[in-house]
Image: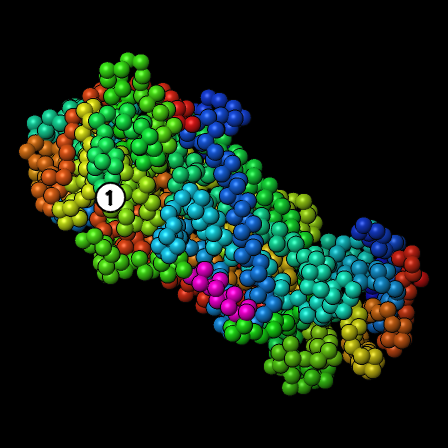
Amino acid sequence: MLSCKKISKSYDNLVLSNFDLEVGGDEIVALLGASGSGKSTLLRIICGLEKSDSGKILFNGVDLEGLPPEKRGIGMVFQNLALFPHLNVFDNIKFGLPTNNSIGEISEMLELVGLKNFDSRKIQTLSGGESQRVALARSLIAKPKMILLDEPLSSLDSSVKESLSLEVRKLIKSLSIPAIYVTHDPRIAELMADRIVYIDENNSSN
Amino acid sequence: MPAEEKNMYRRKALTICLIMICSLLPGCIEDTDTVENDNHLSIISYDAFGITQEHLDQFTNQSGISVEITRAGDAGGVLSTAIQTKDSGLFDLAIGIDNSYLGTALEANIFQPLEIDRSIFSSRALSSYDGNLAIPFDVGSVCINYDSNYVDGENITVPTSLWNFTEPEWEGKFAVQNPRTSSPGRAFFIATVDYFSKDNDSQTNYVDWWKSMYSNNVIVTDGWTTSYETHYSGGYGQWSDGFIGDAHAVVSYCHSPGVEAYYGGNWTTSVALNIEGASFPQIEYISFLYGSEKSSSANIFVNWLVSEEINSQMSTINWMYPAIEGWGIIEDSGYRWHSVVPIDCDIQISQIDSNISSWLDAWDTAMA
Amino acid sequence: MKVRNLVVISWIILVILPLILAWNQLNVVAERNIFEIILDFNNKFQTKNSIFFTFIVAFFSMILTLIIGLPLAWNLGRYKWRYHNFLRSIFTVPFVMPSILVAMGFLALLDFLDILINHNHSDETRFYTLLFAHAWFNVALVIRFCEPLLSTIDRSYEEACRLLPSGKTKISRLRYFWLPLMWPNIAASSALVFVFSFTSFALVKFITPAERNLEVVMANQSEWAGLPVPSLSRVPSEIVLASSTIQLITILLALSIASWLQSQSSGFHLLSLKDGRIRVPFKSLRGVYLLLMVMFIVSPMISLISSSFMIRENGSMIFSLQGWESAFSGSHSPTNAYESLKSSVEYAVLTVLFSLPLGFLLAESIFNLEKTNPKFATFLDVFVMLPLALSAVMVGLGVLLGLMRTEPDLARSWWIPLYGHLMLTTPFVVRVLLPAMRNLNPHLDEAAALLGANYLKRLISIRLCLLKPSIIVACSLVFAISLGEFGASWVVLRFTEYTTLPVMIGDLLSRPGYDPILRPAANAAGTILLLITLVLFISVERFRPLGSGGEF
């Protein structure tokens, strides 16, 4: 369970102000708000890529303060997916494979995301939807304790978005881990999430 | 991280380290034995010194002593380096400090005595200094050369005095070297100091002459090569890149026309100008540096350099007169015929050492 | 992180220490203060007009370089040519050519032109030749700064501009679209051209021997500067002290401007990964222009190569291989071309092995500081470039003479020349890698961290892999610069065992040229250097990714 208490962050202007958020054991929470409302910033703070100005983040009762991103066990799918352009599909996913696990899991994961036989494909040859699945597969094969998704479907057609959203929800649910899904599309939020949290114009939770 | 990945990173890191170490090893394994033992001499010399590797190999075969020569610019560079490394033992011998610098060198106490029989040298070679701290190995007079194609008595008259060069017919046609940056330039400059102190006109001195030369657009270059090769119309420079040929007279050596003839098939239009007292008797020395403990090897090398076998060939090895008695410029190809032995100025090295700084300052001001 | 800090501190010490050592020595001997000396500059032959000449040459060289370089960058960036990579390498190889050889090449060209137009050399002709020689050298900077951006600007932006009122004409598009986009790159390259022209040495010395810039002035005085013989060293010390101060302040200003401008210029958001260039045949007006520029670039090289096969004999120039024979046999020099080339390659390899990691860590430090402390990042960026601004004389004085006073044996160490090579090449590694780092998608590193990869794994598996093309470009640049660097410019003494090819060339050229073999032998050695550098640059060009590789 994730617990964010009174998270505040500002750059030149205030981005987050005393933001509270709780996410249950296998809950998918959609974070909805206008552009610039601090949604992505919150995700980056949770996974350790940025530090908050004040506030606390607890995961399963453990304070994450000071813990580097690679040690938090939290996965993230970026808006631009951040697939490694110099590696093919197999190697991208393998990058997320925990060290003690077998390589056979990669093929299983590819099948799970509907990309069987895509192992040797170059990233640059994938469609938008295919890229999104690879990014998800890479994050999930790492067996994170929680997954964060920062508008990963924003560049896709609405028809593809909807079907993919349901697939993503199904995948996450199968792993029984909490997830936060950032979007500015209320329709996708409704499809994906168990609960929707709004970040209002005061950059605080609602 | 699985074991195979760990091994992969380890292998990569190890490979990189090995490459670095292997590449550094050749440089790290310095042959210090060679440098420090008595069978190796480290010599500092000026850039233009003409002794070749062939000569040095011949010396090594004869004596069992290996030689390494390090270049340090010109004679001034050799002296400044010798002063800087005084007592360090970094170098054993210094080649090329000439008598225009010798006073300063002796003052700086950077030499040790050598055991050379001085009776083998010509009186000309011993004229500035005959002690055992600096042994002459070649001599030559620095004087003005002119191009007889232009200076033929009709177009331009042959000068009989340095004042002739301040006349309109010589405007912009005479090239000299900066005395602060060029050894022949420095030598000629010292000659002018002496020349004008001894001429019949007590009202003027070298400063006045140089001011007049400045007004007459004398060409001043930082080195001999630019004045001789680029500006002088009478030398080999006409085949060099960037040749201008606007100077019909240049400061060079009195035997430079001989060298031109030697390479030019006994033909040259360059002539050495013999104005009494307007040339400088440059004598180049080899010295044993303070801080070196290789007295025995140093003496062997110096004796070799001034031996008849080697020193007699100085006119083709280093384009200067031998220092030893009985030998001069070779006759081949008009080399000797076209060379002139002038009546040089007569100035003491101690006088140079005491006054050169103020002379150069005065020159700097006169030429601005 | 700690290793990076150590590297930054070490670099600062390595750069500052020779300066401090040199200044200290000069101050001991000098009797007047810097202002007094500068005010007296025009009253003394050694320094007369040198300040004015230095600034004038630097300024007009910069202007001429832009006039020649910008259209070239445009034609290379907006249009695709057959043998495009080959052309790009031809236009950029001049930057690493030994300047003394280029001076000879230009003088030979001047002779040829004089014959053609029946014109006599004059100081004015030599001045213009110098400007063109500087432009020849530095056009590579303009191309490297501007062409990557031009080649990857998405065409749709220009097309959109054309349909808008402010972009209907070429002039208006230039004014409202291209110049605002390109001005940081143009200004940054201009600043660097100014810097390199300001500190030019061999070209000024040989092409305009009647004039002196500050670098020539300092080189002339270097023999005695700082030495404990006041009668001979006072004036030289004062001159070097004052000249180096003027030079340092001017260059620091120019580099600061260049650094600040570079940081403004990441056009990442406008870039397209597709090649937006239009194919053009050589049989066009543009093609003719490009071929003329190729001729401008290769003509000094051709004159150098051809003069290596000419020797004077009996009053005329004839074809001969004697120069080549002498170069390879070493009959007229302390070493031969094989040994010198071997030394050159050894030093070049060592330089690459040291400067690449050093430059990488410095670039990473600057890159990370840009996010957390931009002001210090700019300071460090300028500091990294500082060795290029320091007079070789100052560094040589500080390092060598400082060492010779305290640890003379170190003066003959093999790593002394390496130090000089490192100082000169590491800034270029930073100039190549830093923009490439800026252009990397920052999320890639973050994604890898979130997948559990530690710093080392992210460095090796992600960053170094993605930076590989730029690293290869940096390697080739470092290798070429090191290969062509006159060790003597950094090392006062030239030890035979460390004689590199450029030093061998310098040796041959420093002797009186009575012997007709000397000059062709020097040109033969120069030709070897030229051809190796050309081959290196051409073969590496294919690794340069479209639009990246940054400013070099």
Task: Please provide percent x and percent y for residue B291.
Answer: 27, 30
Image quadrant of residue A84?
A: bottom right
Q: Residue at x 37, y 24 (%)?
A: B211
Majority secondary structure of magenta residues: helix
> Looking at the image, what colour scheme do you see?
rainbow
Q: Is residue C127 left or right of residue A71?
A: left
- The reply to whether residue C523 is in sight is yes
Q: Residue at x 53, y 38 (%)?
A: C248
Farthest residue, direction bottom:
A117
Q: Which residue is the site of mark 1? A: B235
Query: Is the C terminus of chain B in the top left, top right, bottom left or bottom right quadrant?
Result: top left
**Residue situated in front as seen by the camera: C462 or C195:** C195
Magenta span of residues: C285-298
Farthest residue, direction front:
B154
Q: Is residue C477 left or right of residue B72?
A: right
SS type, badge 1: loop
Query: Is the N terminus of chain B in the top left, top right, bottom left or bottom right quadrant?
Result: bottom right
Task: Please provide percent x and percent y for residue A32.
Answer: 88, 67
Q: Is residue B306 left or right of residue C51?
A: left
Please check the rendered image and state whether residue C547 is part of the magenta-colored stretch, yes or no: no
Where C464 sits versus B232, above or below? below
**Residue situated in front as seen by the camera: C113 or C391:** C113
Task: Please provide percent x and percent y for residue B217.
Answer: 37, 32
Q: Residue at x 47, y 55 (%)?
A: C136
Residue type, numbered disc 1:
Gly
**Residue situated in front as seen by the camera: C130 or A154:** C130
Where C92 sits versus B282, above or below? below
- The reply to whether residue C449 is in sight is no
Q: Is residue B271 left or right of residue A72?
A: left
